[in-house]
Amino acid sequence: MLREINVSPVRSLGQNFLHDRNLSQWIVDQIEPAAGDYVVEIGPGIGALTVPLLRSGASVLALEKDGRLAAFLKKQYPVEALEVRHGDALDFDVRTLFTRASVKLIGNLPYYISSQLLLKFLEYPSPISLGLLMLQKEMANRLAAAPDSKDYGALSVLLQRHYQIKLVKRVPATVFIPRPEVDSAVIRVTPRRTGELPFFDDDVFVSLVRQGFSQRRKQLGKLLADQIADWPAAAGHIGVDVRARAETLSLDRWIALANYAAPIGLTDPLAPAEELFPIVDESDRVIGSAARGKVHGDNLRHRAVHILVFDAAGEIYLQKRSPLKDRHPGVWDSSAAGHVNAGEDYDEAAARELQEELGIRGSLERIAKLPASDATGQEFIWLYQTRHEGPMSPNKHEIETVKRFQPAMIAGWIANRPGDFAPGFVKCWKTYVERYR
């Protein structure tokens, strides 16, 4: 086929074409593609994986850097289920995949940029529900490595904190044209479930892991002295030898170490011990007050604020709620949101929530008021917007992470993945769109 289309492999693009059809079909079968799936294929080449993917009924987005091969695929397979994009996969905006209901990732990754591609497409939180990737065998071994092995390193721990990674097949160099100098391997990448691991401060975790693996021969007590003053106490707390090195710590123990260095309790220290909310009638007139638990437990009408924060380019910051939250844990929500406390008005509450949740201040513009309903959790909501450029300091008790999105992405995301969002945000976003469309 390469001769027919007058294409020679380009070494600088890492082109090694898979020619074993049985292996191609086996690889595709591992992600169980089906009608309704949206499969992103990195580096489709001449279609070794693309063709069996299309036979499954899945829709395929093929990202091909080589213009010759992109043109060939478009001409050879002119079907609606296949979209071929000519360009570098490193330039692809992964956020657009949140608008798809079921996204899977597959590809024979070029060896020279495989780690960059992995970090881009698997950056947490990712819309990808399953990945099956062929990599250089040494890289695959590193990603799936267990503690106390020569392959276990910072990359292993950093990716495994969000994904289960399993090496599922070793692939000889003989199944490629041209034949590479090393063997390959196929890994399966599956996102971890919410709550599967203990919650921890991700920034602290990453810092500890990177510093801990910075000099593999050194003991952790020496490498982490600036971050953990009493290493013997820390080692005893997480159950490791005081002379331990980085490669001896399992993922669970790295998490325990992060929680020792920066413990995150079940309650927010900024929140009052007993929050009192105003209880209101159907016209939002205050008729009393009650503790948070009673208001939610008895489904009483109360007040809340939501703030949409935009950057200078018009992108919106959304927060992924902490898994520690008692309501709607782990889903996406407005940039900042919270209840109006007793003795507080809406504007005061909005300014406070912006500061407490994101660590920022800004000029708040009222957009609209939403009536209390089942969709809002019996909350009257004032919706605000503001602009912000620069760093934020998300409250770890309230927010797992903050990420920017183009507003145009959100309608499709809500339509195809409604369970990703807190119900109150969905109502607020629809109100915002109606106001400004």
Image (cartoon, helix red, strand yellow):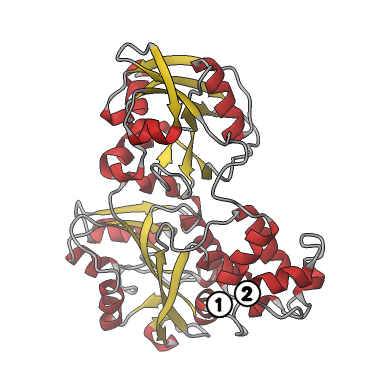
- For residue 31, above or below residue 315: below
User: How many residues crowd mark 1 within 10 Å: few (<14), some (14–19), many (20+)?
Assistant: some
Depth order, front residue of 409/107: 409
Position of residue 392 in the picture relative to residue 282 (left or right): right
Position of residue 55 in the picture relative to residue 261 (left or right): left
Element under label 2? loop
Q: Quadrant of the C terminus?
A: top left
Residue at numbered disc 1: 142
Say whether residue 229 is visible. yes
Badge 2 amino acid: Gly
- For residue 356, above or below residue 123: above
Badge 1 amino acid: Arg
Q: Which residue shows up at 35% across the image and 45% down it?
A: 420
Residue 366, given in percent of the width and then of the height, sits at: 47, 14
- For residue 301, above or below residue 82: above
Mark 1 and mark 2: span between their CA atoms?
7 Å
Residue 273, given in percent of the width and then of the height, sits at: 57, 36
Position of residue 295 in the picture relative to residue 76 (left or right): right
- For residue 55, above or below residue 63: below
* Circle 1/circle 2 CB separation < 8 Å: yes
Residue 316, given in percent of the width and then of the height, sits at: 48, 32
Residue 75, given in percent of the width and then of the height, sits at: 25, 57
Residue at numbered disc 2: 153
Q: Which mark is residue 358?
A: none
